[in-house]
Amino acid sequence: MGYDIKVLINSLKGISGSGNVLAKSLENAANFLRTLEPGDLAGGDTYFSAAPIAYDLWYLWCHKNMLEQYFPGIDGNHYDYSKYLSENMSFLDKMTGLKPVKTIRDPEKHLSSKEYFSVYNMRDMVDWYNNGVYWINSIAFELWKEGQNIQHDSDGPKDFTKSEYCGYLAFPIGQLGVMEVIALIHETDLIGYKWGGKSVKGELDGYTETDKPTIQTPPLMFPDMVNSSGHQLAGMNYCYGKHILESAYLVPESEKMNVENLAEDFPNGAYEDVKPKKWMRYWMKQENTFPVPGEFVGILVRPVACPPHVWWFQESSPFLYAGNWVETYCLTSGIVIEVKLEEDRTDEKTGNQYKIKVQGCEIIVEATDFLLYSVGDRVSVLKLGKIEIEQEKSYLWNDLETFVEADKGTEQPYYVIFPGTFYDGG
């Protein structure tokens, strides 16, 4: 992106009597060649910005959209997922304005422009807009019990003891130095939950103004360096969630035994080819109390704001880069949104019937007992037909049974609520 230095300087002459100073600066700029950030160049009477280069924009090269699997047969490169996000992933609203990355799959359709003549700059100008698709790169995960084989192993962090772990989350990542913070979030941490008569608060109850995403309206080419309250963000590692990378390069001391960068690639067919990206894995210990089976787990990234990296008109900083619903082989959970009492049923079946949201999709299920669950409760769900099958292998993200749009409002006889809790729910 080139700018004519003479035009810029001439537009500033006369401000506070600065004309002579600026004229001298123009002479110096014409006689010297300067480099700034990688790819920036100032020389002669022209300044060329490094934006964009591949190093800056690896997060726009996206893979395996988690959202697409819920709409089979669509054109995933042009589909508007806004309705799904608002209805099935409304918990993201707790982080006001948080949005997924808006990728550019089709430049001719996703990049629009407005051309006009600027009196201030005395030149023709172009404003660009990103009309791209919301994208959540699918997190690959693997969970195992004692005695089960790990199907897609990796070396792990240096000197870690693999027997202490029961699973991992993995997501594709580009070169370090672009994202100041990479953080892990999970649904129940955001919103809390009621389970077994006990309320568990989410950590958002105590988060501060600096934890909130910075929102750009309208979206601009560069991320903000301050948030809406005027707090300086550049270089401050502000980002909600469990930080697994800070200061663009550093793994926090508390996470060094859990975070593996440049992890092993997955074999062909398990996940689409992500080259030239590599993989980052977050290894989960046996004593971890997340994820709750059935909840959403996501990866937030906050770009380095100073020096600015072109981010092509994203809508929030941080933004949601990767995620997935995570459950186990025979267990998941859902949130009750409607209760039909036994006396109100017309099908002559016994017990109460519940409409719950699993993976954000509304399905109708029965319960194994006569305990009355209430609207807003998170309930444990057993996948019938799975519990008696002998498992030799671990549970992979590819084993995840997904509820598509056509499943909304349907009865699911192989899913049943049972009076169990996980972790803090007891």
Image: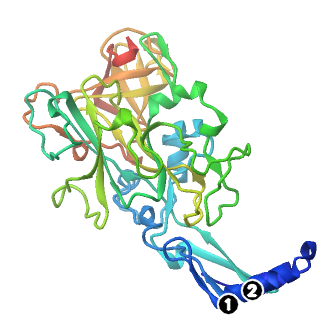
- Is 127 positioned to the left or the right of 188 in the image? right
Circles 1 and 2: CB atoms closer than 8 Å: yes
The image quadrant that residue 172 belongs to is bottom left
Image quadrant in which the N terminus is located? bottom right
Residue 145, percent across and down? 15, 28
Residue found 18% across the figure and 59% down from its top? 269
Residue at screen point 35% across, 18% down? 423
Percent from the top left, x then y, of residue 273?
25, 64
Q: Nearer the viewer, residue 339 or 45?
A: 45
In the picture, the disc for residue 30 is 1
Under circle 1, the secondary element is: helix
- Neighbor class of circle 1 (other Cα within 10 Å; few <14, some 14-19, many 20+) is some
Above or below, comparing residue 2 to residue 405 in the picture: below
Q: Is residue 231 left or right of residue 247?
A: right
Residue 392 in view here: yes
Using the numbered discs, state the Cα–Cα distance from disc 1 to disc 2 in whole angstroms: 6 Å
The C terminus: image quadrant: top left
Percent coordinates x, y for residue 92 in the rendering:
54, 40
Looking at the image, which is closer to me, 279 or 147? Answer: 279
Q: On residue 26, which mark appears?
A: 2
> What's the amino acid at mark 2?
Leu
Residue sitting nearer the eye, 177 or 400: 177
Using the image as rendered, state which of residue 361 and residue 96 is in the foreground. Answer: 96
Residue found at x 83% / y 79%: 21
Q: Amino acid at mark 1?
A: Ala
Residue 345 picture location, percent across and down: 44, 19
- Does residue 120 appear in the picture of this structure? no
